[in-house]
Image: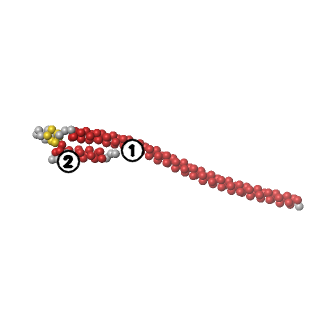
Amino acid sequence: MSDLLAYRESCMKEDRLRERAERAEADVDWWKAHFYKRNDILKDNIQRKKKAEAELANTQIAVAHYDIDLKRVRAERNRLRRMADQWWDLINNSRGVDGLHLNGDLATWEDLLPGGRFEEWLSEMETEADDALAGGT
């Protein structure tokens, strides 16, 4: 009878070991799945990070070009402002343009500026200057 008990005992130990092995195998399978899922998430995050870094680099390049263009536009606007200031300084410190009519008469600024008899002579230049100055900040 002791052989029978010993056999029964060894069968029970074998069953417990088999159950432990099955549980361990299930645990390993769970950890593998968990690892692969985490690994996929990590790979996806790395890809998104690389894409974001590329977009950031492109944005930085675009901003640099915009900065260069903005500096050029501001320099041109400042040049036009100086030119307009000089133009108005000339108008404010003189009576008009001598010899413009080719008859010896003085063409006064009142005649050449808007509302004057010959306003069309300078209107295009004035309009372009105003448009150019209005375009910048």
Q: Which mark is residue 47?
A: none
Give the answer, above or below, for where 82 lies relative to 31: above
- Give the residue drawn at x 19%, y 45%: 113
- Give the residue drawn at x 15%, y 47%: 117
Check disc 2 and report the residue beneath it: 114
Q: Which mark is residue 66?
A: 1
Query: x, y percentage for residue 116?
Result: 17, 47
Q: Marks 2 and 1: which is nearer the front?
A: 2
Give the answer, above or below, for where 100 lies relative to 51: above
Residue at the farthest left position: 103
On the picture, is 122 further left or further right than 63? left
User: Please, what is the three-letter code of the amino acid marked with disc 2?
Assistant: Pro
Residue at the farthest right position: 1
On the picture, is 17 further left or further right than 97? right
Give the answer, above or below, for where 104 lies relative to 18: above
Could you say which is closer to the camera, residue 59 or residue 102?
102
Query: x, y percentage for residue 30?
Result: 65, 55
Instruction: For the N terminus, give its image quadrant.
Output: bottom right
Residue at the farthest front position: 93
Residue 82, located in which quarter of the rendered image?
top left
Quick one: label 1, few (<14), some, or many (20+) residues within 10 Å? Answer: few
> From where the camera sits, is residue 32 visible?
yes
Could you say which is closer to the camera, residue 42 or residue 111?
111
User: Please, what is the three-letter code of the amino acid marked with disc 1?
Assistant: Tyr
Secondary-structure class at tag 1: helix
N-terminal of the pair, mark 2 or mark 1, is 1
Residue 129, located in which quarter of the rendered image?
top left
Quick one: label 2, few (<14), some, or many (20+) residues within 10 Å? Answer: some
- Give the residue drawn at x 60%, y 53%: 37
